[in-house]
Amino acid sequence: MSNIIEVTNITKSFKDGDRVTEVLKGVSFSVPKGQFVAIMGRSGAGKSTFLYQLGLLDHPTSGELMLDGVDILKLKSEERTRFRLERLGYVFQDYALLPDLTAIENVVLPLLMQNVPDDIAYEKSKQALMRVGLEKRMYSLSNKLSGGEQQRVSIARSIAHDPKILFADEPTANLDSESSENVISIFKELHKQGQTIVMVTHEADYGKITDRTVLLADGVIIEDTINAHS
Amino acid sequence: MTFEQYLQTSLSALKRNRSRTGLTILGIVIGIAAIILIMSLGKGAQKLILSQVQGLGTKSVVVVPGRQLEGPPSTVGLESLKKRDLEELSKPYNVPHAAHVIPLIFGNDITEYESENFRAQIYGSSDQMPVIFDADPVEGMFFSQDDVVGSANVVVIGSKVNTELFPNGGGLGSRIKIKDKSFKVVGILPSKGASSLINFDDGVIIPYTAAQNYLFGTKHFDRILVDVDTEANIDITIEDVKQTLRMTHDIDDPTKDDFSIVNQKDLADRVGVITTALTYFLAAVAAISLLVGGIGIMNIMLVSVTERTREIGLRKAVGATTKNILLQFLFESVVLTLLGGIIGIILGTTASFVASVVIGRLASFEWTFIFPIGGAVLGIVVSTIIGLIFGVYPARQAARKSPIEALRYE
Ligand SMILES: Nc1ncnc2c1ncn2[C@@H]1O[C@H](COP(=O)(O)OP(=O)(O)OP(=O)(O)O)[C@@H](O)[C@H]1O
Ligand SMILES: [Mg+2]
């Protein structure tokens, strides 16, 4: 099977006392290797929740999930964490950097968590920071960087270990147009190099650069289009 | 993560909130300082009591005239102990287990030698006194039984009296004046400090006969000491002493006794009870403040966990395992309590040192400062354990947080 993501009938509900809210109501979805997918939808549609399930930051209530040929829901919690660290990359809307650490320390942290030897981990981190054009700000504290720079550190962190799939949740939502363009061009470049990318976005414009647009509404996929340009 | 990484992360987290860190560990500081004080003062008190008791020995029974130990101080019968009592108590068929029986007369007066003078404690006793009090002169000899029988004008002087009257030495064999009576110095005592009855350093000892005849003009004793052959015979001997004295004083009704008996061992036991009570009290203070301190630590750690929900989530999102987070927070609380423990040890040690100096000044006896190594080790162990116990719950709360929860937390 050549699909790197294979989602079958995933649901996710949250319990709040007696009230149960079903945020994902059975989503099926597959992505072939190398595809750049945009996930769109209104606020509250469940986009972030969906991406958390795919990115293994959360655990679905029911359904099936195959990533890179591995039946994820059969894995133990530590194995899932390991899988996530080794094969997935995640870019958060608000960068999610540790403010007390420098740019390179933020990038190197997940590598060290995987017990990659120090020298290799730092080398990979440097290269990742170069790929996002931040070699000059490597040793700055992350909270001293601009929003666009912080988001690029976050991208560097997500790609330093050459992930099989890159997830991004509204990576440009907090950025001005120039920084946004900068970030998007990085994604375009990564895509060109064969990176599989799933990106949640509000910008209809990004349909021009992605291979495919998936529209979520109220916890289900209501539209799935292959974009004409590719 | 390595030990150093945990330590570094904990320290930087604690540094971020210096004043809160300080307040948080206050309870631990007080608790550990109290432990140190207990151990140090307890040891000091024990040593003091031992040295006091040893001045006389736990085998001694002290006969006190009158009834001043019970009820309001009574002046009746203060002159009840006479030479006849001494003689009767010395007879083996009256008190078979008495090894030595010695009288004591107390007073104080100016002693003079040429232009020097000094107000000294004056003790009248018998030649047996050094046996009971372990008071052998460093120079010369104690006076003899003949001196006692013949009310000789001889004196054994304490070390302070010696240096005051004879700043240039040469005291032995000189004649000093007490109340214008001349006494020949036959012995000089080593420096001894005070025991419970006698202040040797500031004192002069003369035959009790000389004290009665030349200085005080009295016929009674202030104390009679009975040294018992072995500790096991103390109770029998107390009974024997009572019987003998009642016989010589013609007393049928024990409630009319014109004397009382103090047992050194009872005295030591009584002081022991007080120090034990004090120790329990301080131990309770320590325990309570450690408990309160521990709860304080737990409270602050819970606040910290909530405040750092986002940090925890981020760490988890970049691969920190539940175990990493658990250890991280446990580490932090242990670092916190250990810090408190170390400060407590320093504070407690300083306090007990100051206490030893102050006690030594105020009371005239030796109070040795003892650094309580056992207390320090205990302090370290206890504060670590408190950190672990009260850190587990917050650490588990932290570890349980999911990355998602953290990312949604603002
Ligand atoms: N942990 C949770 N507990 C309860 N409800 C939740 C939880 N996470 C998400 N939800 C609810 O699920 C719904 C979808 O949330 P989600 O964050 O996935 O939306 P979204 O599509 O990403 O919106 P936005 O564009 O604003 O980011 C919302 O109504 C939200 O309140
Ligand atoms: Mg969202």
Image (spheres, rainbow, N blue to C red):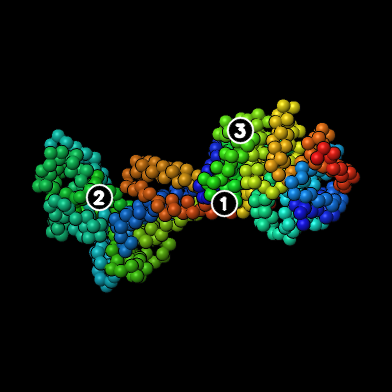
Mark identifier at residue A134: 3
Task: Label 1: state its secondary structure.
Answer: loop
Examine the rendered structure and indicate whether residue B100 appears above or below residue B193: below
Q: Residue, x 63% and y 49% (percent of image)?
A: B320
Residue A139 image offset from top left, x and y in percent: 55, 34
Going by the numbered disc 2, the residue's amino acid type is Lys
**For this view, does A122 lie left or right of residue A76?**
left
Residue A71 % position (x, y): 74, 59
Q: Disc 1 vs disc 3: which is toward the camera? A: 3
Report the Cα–Cα distance between label 1 and label 2. 69 Å
Q: Secondary structure at mark 3?
A: loop
Count of marks, rendered view: 3
Q: Quarter holding the C terminus of chain B?
A: top right
Residue at 37 percent across and 61 percent down: it is: B265
User: Chain letter of disc 1?
Assistant: A
Labels 2, 3: front one: 3
Identify the amino acid type marked 1: Asn
For the residues beneath circles 2 and 3, the answer to whether they share a chain is no
Residue B74 seen in the current view: no
At x 70%, y 31%, the residue is: A182
**Residue matched to label 2:** B192
- Are the residues tagged 1 and 2 within 8 Å (C-beta)? no
What chain is tagged by disc 3? A
Q: Position of residue B282 (x, y in %)?
A: 49, 50
Q: Which amino acid lies under the numbered mark 3 shown in the image of this protein? A: Leu
